[in-house]
C-alpha cells in the first residue's frame, strides 16, 4: 500500500504567554483525532505539543496534500482556538492566517510535512520494518534543521553509515528558496558531489530550507521538512515559523544516533524572543513548555515504528528525554548566556531584513525619516533643516 505520514502543526493559543497550549486545548484535538481514526479518515494519529505549538501526526492512505486530511487538521486547530478564546489564552488562532481555506492548507499558516511511500514490510527488502522520527521545534526560524540534517545525511563525521554500500551513493537534497513567494522554488543538489553548493545555500537558514531528502540508491524519500515563512504568508509578523520534520531511519537511511548527534551542537538559530534573536537550539522532551531564560529555541524528537497496517507502535521513544541530553541542555544554556551578554548588539539579534516583529522595522523607518545630509562645511542645506529640527515633525 501507499502509506502517507503527515504532520501538521499550529500555534493556536497558549497559557501564561507563549508557553504551551492548555490541557483542554490538547484534549479537544486528541478527541478529534480519535474520532477521525474511528471514522476511517486516518489509520492512526498522535497529538503532542512542543512549546506552544500543537502537532498532529497522522498515518493514512489519502496521499500528500489530501484536502480531507488537511481540513481535518484545520478544523481541529479551530476547535482548540475556540477553547483558547473562551479562556482568554494568549495568541488564540495565531497561526490560522486565512479564513476557511478550501482543499489543502499549505500556505494557510500551519506547518506541514508529509512523506508518502510504499509500505509493504513483508516483501520489500529495502524496508522490512518502517521506523521514523518526528521533530518539532518552537521559537525558531524555518531553516533550523538545515545544519543537523545536512550533517546527518551528508557527513560521515556524523553518519558513518554513509560509508556502507546501502548509503554510499548519497542523498539528493531538494532545497526551497523561501524568498520566492510566487511559489515553491526548488533546486536539487546531490551529496556528496554538490557538497559545497549545498553548504552555500544551507548556511542561510532564513532564506533556504530543506524541503525533502531522498536516497540516491532507491529514490525513496527519507525526510520532509515544513519549510515556509509565516511572515511571507501573512505579510507581517505573526509568530515564528517553528518547523516540523518527518525522517525515516535505519536500513537505507541513517540511524537515529546518526541523525541526532548533530543536535549535540545546540547550534545557534534565528528566533527566540519576539522571533528576532539568535540563540542556541536546545533539545527537550516532547510536551515541554517554553519557560527558559529569554525563551531558548526548543526542539523535540520522538520515534515510532509502523505496523504492516500503517498503525503507529503502541508507544514511542522520546529521544531527547534521556539524561544523555542533559549535558547538551547545559551547553545550550551556556551558549545562551554568552549570547545574551551582548543584548541587542550585532550578532545577538537578527539583521534588519530578518526582524520578525515588523514593529522593530517601523521604529527604524520612523528614525530614517529624521536623517538630514550635512555638507562639507558642517551645515545643513536650506530647506532640509538640522537633525534637531526634524525631530519636531
Ligand atoms: P511563537 O511563534 O512560538 O508564538 O513565538 C512568538 C514570540 O514572539 C516569542 O517571543
Ligand atoms: Mg505562540
Ligand atoms: Mg510557537
Image (cartoon, rainbow, N blue to C red):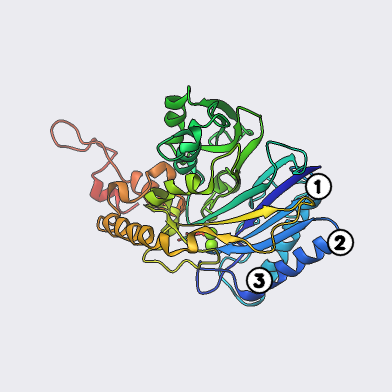
* Disc number for residue 61: 1
Residue 203 rendering spot, x and y as whole percentages? 42, 36
- Marked residue nearer the N-terminal end (2 or 3): 3
Q: Are marks 2 and 3 in contact (CB under 8 Å)?
A: no
**351 vs 313: above or below:** above
Q: Are marks 1 and 2 in contact (CB under 8 Å)?
A: no
**Residue 159 can be seen, yes or no:** yes
Residue linked to disc 2? 39
User: Which image quarter: residue 351?
Assistant: top left
Residue linked to disc 3? 25
Number of the front mark, 2 or 3: 2
- Marks 1 and 2 sit apart, C-alpha to C-alpha, by 14 Å
Residue 333 rendering spot, x and y as whole percentages? 33, 61
Near-viewer residue (204 or 375)? 204
| Residue at the spot 43% in from the left edge and 46% down from the top edge | 262
* Disc number for residue 83: none
Q: Residue furthest bottom?
A: 87
Looking at mark 1, is its residue's CB closer than 8 Å to ligand 3?
no
Is residue 18 left or right of 26 when viewed as pictured?
A: left
| Residue at the spot 79% in from the left edge and 47% down from the top edge | 67
- Marked residue nearer the N-terminal end (3 or 1): 3
* Disc 2 residue crowd, few under 14, some 14–19, many 20+, Cα 10 Å: few
Number of the front mark, 3 or 1: 1
Kindly state the secondary structure of the residue where label 1 is placed: loop
Q: Residue furthest right?
A: 39
Q: Quadrant of the N terminus?
A: top right
**391 vs 125: above or below:** below
Kindly state the secondary structure of the residue where label 2 is placed: loop
Kindly state the secondary structure of the residue where label 3 is placed: helix
| Residue at the spot 21% in from the left edge and 38% down from the top edge | 380
Residue 135 rendering spot, x and y as whole percentages? 56, 52
Amino acid at each position: 500500500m501507499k502509506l502517507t505520514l503527515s504532520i501538521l502543526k499550529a500555534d493556536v493559543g497558549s497559557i501564561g504567554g507563549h508557553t504551551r497550549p492548555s490541557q483542554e486545548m490538547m484534549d479537544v484535538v486528541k478527541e478529534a483525532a480519535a474520532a477521525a481514526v474511528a471514522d476511517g479518515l486516518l489509520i492512526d494519529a498522535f497529538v503532542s505539543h512542543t512549546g506552544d505549538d500543537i502537532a498532529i501526526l497522522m498515518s493514512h492512505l489519502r496521499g500528500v496534500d489530501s484536502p480531507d486530511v488537511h481540513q481535518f487538521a484545520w478544523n481541529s486547530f479551530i476547535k482548540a482556538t475556540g477553547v483558547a478564546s473562551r479562556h482568554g489564552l494568549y495568541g488564540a488562532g495565531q497561526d490560522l492566517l486565512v479564513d476557511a481555506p478550501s482543499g489543502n492548507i499549505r500556505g494557510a499558516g500551519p506547518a506541514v510535512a508529509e512523506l508518502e511511500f510504499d509500505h509493504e514490510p513483508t516483501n520489500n527488502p529495502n524496508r522490512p520494518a518502517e521506523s521514523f522520527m518526528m521533530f518539532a521545534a518552537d521559537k525558531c526560524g524555518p531553516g533550523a534543521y538545515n545544519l543537523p540534517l545536512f550533517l546527518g545525511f551528508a557527513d560521515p563525521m556524523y553518519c558513518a553509515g554513509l560509508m556502507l554500500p546501502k548509503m554510499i551513493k548519497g542523498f539528493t537534497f531538494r532545497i526551497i528558496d523561501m524568498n520566492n513567494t510566487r511559489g515553491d522554488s526548488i533546486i536539487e543538489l546531490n551529496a556528496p558531489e554538490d557538497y559545497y553548493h549545498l553548504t552555500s545555500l544551507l548556511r542561510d537558514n532564513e532564506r533556504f530550507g530543506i524541503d525533502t531528502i531522498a536516497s540516491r540508491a532507491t529514490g525513496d524519500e527519507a525526510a520532509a521538512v515544513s519549510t515556509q515563512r509565516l511572515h511571507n504568508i501573512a505579510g507581517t509578523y505573526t509568530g515564528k515559523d517553528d518547523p516540523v520534520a518527518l525522517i525515516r531511519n535505519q536500513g537505507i537511511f541513517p540511524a537515529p544516533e546518526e541523525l541526532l548527534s548533530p543536535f549535540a551542537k545546540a547550534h545557534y538559530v534565528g528566533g527566540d524572543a519576539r522571533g528576532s534573536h539568535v540563540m542556541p537550539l536546545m533539545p527537550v522532551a516532547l510536551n515541554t513548555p517554553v519557560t527558559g531564560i529569554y525563551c531558548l529555541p526548543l526542539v523535540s524528537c520522538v520515534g515510532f515504528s509502523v505496523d504492516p497496517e500503517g498503525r503507529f507502535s503502541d508507544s514511542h521513544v522520546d529521544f531527547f528525554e534521556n539524561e544523555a541530553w542533559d549535558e547538551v541542555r547545559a551547553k545550550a544554556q551556556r551558549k545562551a548566556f554568552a549570547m545574551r551578554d551582548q543584548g541587542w548588539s550585532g550578532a545577538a539579534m537578527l539583521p534588519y531584513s530578518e526582524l520578525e516583529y515588523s514593529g522593530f522595522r517601523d521604529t527604524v523607518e520612523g528614525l530614517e525619516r529624521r536623517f538630514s545630509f550635512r555638507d562639507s562645511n558642517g551645515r545643513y542645506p536650506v530647506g532640509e533643516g538640522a537633525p534637531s529640527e526634524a525631530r519636531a515633525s
